[in-house]
Image: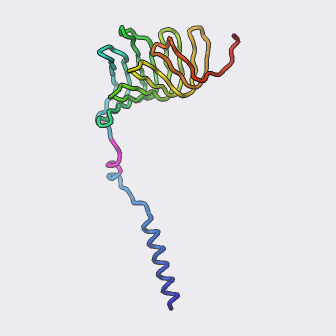
């Protein structure tokens, strides 16, 4: 009889353990409370970024989400960015699927299918690219392909350049040349 009571107690403890380990069910209304929503949404947006009152970039995108507490903007679909020199002359153009902007620093990160074309004839292809407005520098740690104004094609990993792509370098170049 004592054995039977011990077995019943053991079974009750095991069942209680499994019941308490179940994950709670979250209904749709509770889930909505967990998801962070943007403070602002806009479609067909145009943004001008300045540095000391001088236009440095003009951005167009199909969709924008702005998060005020994070000082963060997300741009999606057909992101186009024109970069400007100190005289507000357009010097290069970037296209990407998506971009993110830190509003405190105007630091921009472009993501997916990036093409940067400079007015000097250099074209860069990569998957991520950052623009530091304060240092006026574009860079990536990803794979890159560059075509030069003389139709050379260069490959590598990592890239740094000024925005007009006149002084650029591939950090880990690779490939073959006939020169």
- Colour style of the rendered protein structure: rainbow
- Which residue occupies 34% across, 25% down? 44
In the displayed structure, 93 sits above or below 35; it is: above
Q: Quadrant of residue 64?
A: top left
Tell me where residue 106 appears, x and y as whole percent: 36, 25
Determine the residue positioned at 61% across, 17% down. 154
Q: Specify the farthest residue to the bottom.
A: 1
Question: Where's residue 80, x and y in %?
Answer: 42, 21
Q: Tell me if residue 166 comes above or below residue 20 in the rendering.
A: above
Q: Position of residue 140 (x, y in %)?
A: 51, 26
Instruction: Work out which residue is located at the far right of the displayed protein and give it.
Output: 178
| Front residue of this view, candidates 113 and 164 | 164
Q: Quadrant of residue 91?
A: top left
> Is residue 77 one of those drawn in magenta?
no
Specify whether 110 is left or right of 105. right
| Magenta highlight: main SS | helix
- Percent coordinates x, y for residue 122 in the rendering: 53, 13
How many labels, in total? 0
Q: Nearer the viewer, residue 124 or 30?
A: 124
- Outermost front residue: 135
Q: Bounds of the magenta span?
A: 31-36
Q: Quadrant of the C terminus?
A: top right
Q: Quadrant of residue 47?
A: top left
Rendered position, 162 above or below 100: above
């Amino acid at each position: 009889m004592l054995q039977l009571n011990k077995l019943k107690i053991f079974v009750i403890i095991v069942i209680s353990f499994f019941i308490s380990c179940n994950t709670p069910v979250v209904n749709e209304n509770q889930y909505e409370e967990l998801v962070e929503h943007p403070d602002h949404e806009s479609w067909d947006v145009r943004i001008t970024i300045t540095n000391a009152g001088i236009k440095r970039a003009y951005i167009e995108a199909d969709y924008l989400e702005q998060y005020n507490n994070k000082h963060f903007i997300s741009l999606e679909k057909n992101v186009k960015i024109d970069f400007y020199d100190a005289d507000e002359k357009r010097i290069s153009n970037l296209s990407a699927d998506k971009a993110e902007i830190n509003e405190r620093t105007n630091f921009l990160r472009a993501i997916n299918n990036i093409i940067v074309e400079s007015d000097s004839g250099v074209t860069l292809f990569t998957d991520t690219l950052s623009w530091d407005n304060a240092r006026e520098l574009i860079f990536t740690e990803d794979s890159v392909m560059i075509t030069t104004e003389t139709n050379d094609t260069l490959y590598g990993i990592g890239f740094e350049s000024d925005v007009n792509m006149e002084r650029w370098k591939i950090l880990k170049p690779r490939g073959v040349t006939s020169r």
